[in-house]
Image (cartoon, grey):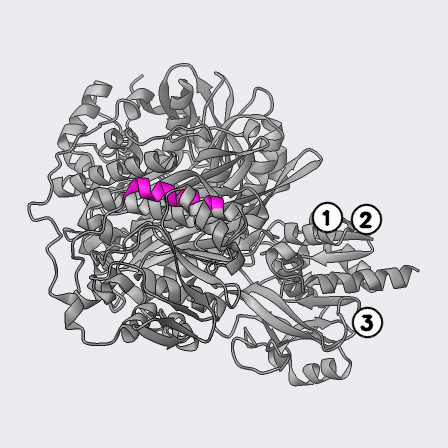
Amino acid sequence: MNIAVVRFPGSNADWDALHAARDVLGADARYVFHLESSLGEADAVIVPGGFSYGDYLRPGAIACFSPIVPALRAFAERGGPILGICNGFQILTELGLLPGALTRNRQLRFECRDVWVRAEGRGPFTPAEGTVLRLPIAHADGRYHCDAQTLAELEDSGRIAFRYCSPAGEVTEDHPVNPNGSAGNVAGVYNERLNVMGMMPHPERSAEEILGNVDGLQIFESLRRHLSGACG
Amino acid sequence: MTPIRLPGDPRPSPALAAEYGLSAEEYGKVLEVLGREPTYAELGVFSVMWSEHCSYKSSRIHLARLPTTGPRVVQGPGENAGAVDIGDGFCAVFKMESHNHPSFIEPYQGAATGVGGILRDVFTMGARPIASLNSLRFGSPDHPRTRALLRGVVAGIGGYGNCIGVPTVGGEVQFDPSYDGNILVNAFTVGVAKTSQLFFGRAEGVGNAVIYVGARTGRDGIHGATMASAEFDDASERKLPTVQVGDPFMEKLLLEACLEIFAADCLEGVQDMGAAGLTSSSVEMAERAGTGLELDLDAIPRRTRNLSPYEMLLSESQERMLMVAKPGREHEVFERCQRWGLDAAVVGRVTDTGRFVCRATPGHDPLDARPVPRDPQIVVDIPIAELTAAAPRYDRPRRAPTTPPVAAGPAATTAAGGSCADTLLALLGSPNIGSRAWVWRQYDHIVRDGTVVRPGDGDAAVVRVFCEDGDRTLIKLLAMSVDVNGRHVQLEPRNGASMAVAECARNVLCSGAEPLGLTDCLNFGNPEKPEVMWQFAEAVEGIREACLALDVPVVSGNVSFYNETDGRAILPTPTVAVVGQLADPADRLAMAWRAEGDLVAHLGIPGRGGLGGSELLVQRTGQVCGEPVRIDLEAERALGQAMLALARAHVLSSAHDVSEGGLGCCLAECCVASGLGARVTLPGHGDADTEALLFGEEPSRIVVSFPAEHRARVESICAGHDVPCQAIGNVGGHTLAVDGVLEIPVASLTRAHASALDTIVGD
């Protein structure tokens, strides 16, 4: 399993993603610098968290003009699995590879805390439907927004990957269950083809016993199962 | 050569010098050193290099007494940061610095650039920053400015650290009216480097190119170092243009480019442009190497038109570095800067003259469509030693206050009337003791996948570090804490400063780590006042005594004087941060009770009922008062050694030291962190007041819990170190019960604790 971690100049969870994929999951994982034009031989791509190009304009806005973007689009069009985490999710929505947008948190503050999400949609990155995971968030712009029609379509087509929920799995709108005011409590969504998924919580920062949480590993294990099924 | 006077430059005079912070006597020394009148640019250079901030002129003779050596010290004070050995050829590089005055004027940018500056100090040494802490002081919770200052400072620290991707893993916040007009923002960063690949701020090699890297120069922050060396008054807000503006994305580029440049081993030396910008970085690098330095100011990358030499030399624009390349290897620096999209330019050469020389073409501006043709003239020519080693140095008069501030306050403990339960809930829910979650949730405290003990969970943060050594990756665990309580320092500076060092080391020990080294950030009032200078000298002595007793060397530090507004000084606040190392991940400990039925024990000499300087007395009387509680450094040392042995024996479930709010708040915090209750008997002398035993802040005490089957081991380890160990109860139930004194549901404690900052932040 070969995983490419795209590295923009302001990526800062690039190490976290590389470490989780390489040292925890045991994949062949490597960085692909934003100035490159090819992803190389990759079975899956992670677009990690951070502040791509400073994100002073709008998170991910400038990343759309990055030299690596055509390769990323082509990989998505070929059906390759892409996981966008945090800033990666923001970038994928700016690229139009995922629907909706991520806006300033309802609290208008950066928020770093553990939250709970419930797996819903079925795709390469989601564990069994109904699985409740504890994962950390660390963002200022994570409030998912899309119009009502899009949200209904996402629900109907099983493209909502994760929703924020209580530790018991109940989806309620109150803070901190829904930590940022996301529409429909959306924490992660798939594209139409179900090969591109973006999520605000950080599974790569919660995949090891020493960090006190291994729930995030389930997302990477899902990918492993998906790839071994697809390849074998 | 005599430098030329540029048209339009003000004429230096004693009056102008005074405006820039040089006394009449100091200006006289400038004239004597140069043998002529300085140019305007030279006056600027002298005023910043001889400022308190850069020269340490009032503190130097006292700081020389601090213990700075030890078997684990790799680099002591004098470089951009200190370093201690963490084994296998790696070292931890750390330092703390203040950004008090800028943060009061513009809290977001002031705090943000404070973080940026300390990060650069650490990565300048060749270390990748792995964690940050901060120590914050604000005025009274109900002071009209406190809310906006707190919000701005926290947002600024988060805004910078979160973007560059260095986790902010802990810190401390205290509110006291003495900070109403002068808040404190002390920022700490630790990084990790291979010891053989540390970089130093040295301009070695005559003829080598001096390279400017990073953000372009603007007019921001001119005379920031001088501002940091003067008292505040009502006009201080007019100093807004001296506050710098931070660009954490630029710093991220600078960080990654620097680490790649360092890895290529093409540099002789490097230093960031911090306080006093281009001037201090050039002068200090040449001084350390015993060389000279010549700058061509026409070549300085700039973002603003018509910058004068004075402005270029004094600008404190952020995110800039000065490098000295090895001969012929400049291109390797340029290639890496280009990869990260950074400006870089050769702006000078190392010389053998021992002089700081700057040339500029009058009227030349490279940003002009058709610049005036270059014809550089000398505008600055100063012997470097006169700016550094020969800088003024004062043994300022010191005088103990005639009325020591120990006058016992009004009869505080008996007047209250309320129950101990009410008092505990009130203390736990007060801004100085309750939860800081509102603060640290705004910091990304988990980026880089290393935070093993998170903020609020333990007495110290614990961070896992990956040390890459060729094909091997070694994992190290570092613990860190930052502490001081200015109230105890106010009551008795020497004792209070010792208590700060002891508490900080104790916090690191309570996380299961061995303390390796300390950095300090000494925040005081106006050193020209003998009472302040006395506080300072006494506090330095207190740090010295504690560091010697506890075997913790001082490897770096910073002094911030003139923390006064309208003649009123802050509480003396010698902030210290200690870095320690865990031998094994299984040694780590946090404060939460772990299991029902575990025994609870009190380690150390039980309290005698001393309430001096405590939060309770301040709340009751509105003043810092009482007979100081005193530290016994020998007892502290023994307690620390027992604590480390217990952690390494893996017999404990939890550990938490007794500090602000006393034993009562300590026990409550263990309950809140775990959601578990406890039933205990209050240890201590029978004749002491119960309330004083519960809430007194006497040092050198730790509350631990452990499974009953480990009791004999725990007791024998403590006995082996001559440390009293008294079993006081058990973990369990839904209440915190102190026999015959109070019983409070854990849910009530949790609610009170969680709401501590609500009245200030409003949500």
Question: Which is more toward the observer, B432 or B4?
Answer: B432
Q: Which image quadrant: the N terminus of chain B?
A: top left
Task: Choose the circle earlier in sequence order: 1 or 2.
Answer: 1
Q: Which residues are magenta?
A: B632-645
Residue B300 location in percent, x, y?
Answer: 46, 34
Residue B35, can we see it?
A: yes
The picture quadrant where one finds residue B685 is bottom left
- The answer to whether B618 appears left or right of B306 in the picture is left
Residue sitting at x 56%, y 27% = B196
As measured in the structure, the alpha-carbon distance from the residue carrying label 2 to the one carrying label 3 is 22 Å
Badge number at residue A40: 2
The amino acid sitting under disc 2 is Gly
Residue sitting at x 37%, y 72% = B737
Question: Which is more toward the observer, B36 or A103?
Answer: A103
Residue sitting at x 29%, y 46% = B499
Number of labels in the image equals 3
**How many other residues sit within 10 Å of disc 3, few (<14), some (14-19) or many (≥20)?**
few
Say which residue label 1 marks.
A32
Predominant secondary structure in magenta?
A: helix
Identify the secondary structure beneath mark 1.
strand
Identity of the residue furthest to the top in this view = B352
The amino acid sitting under disc 3 is Arg
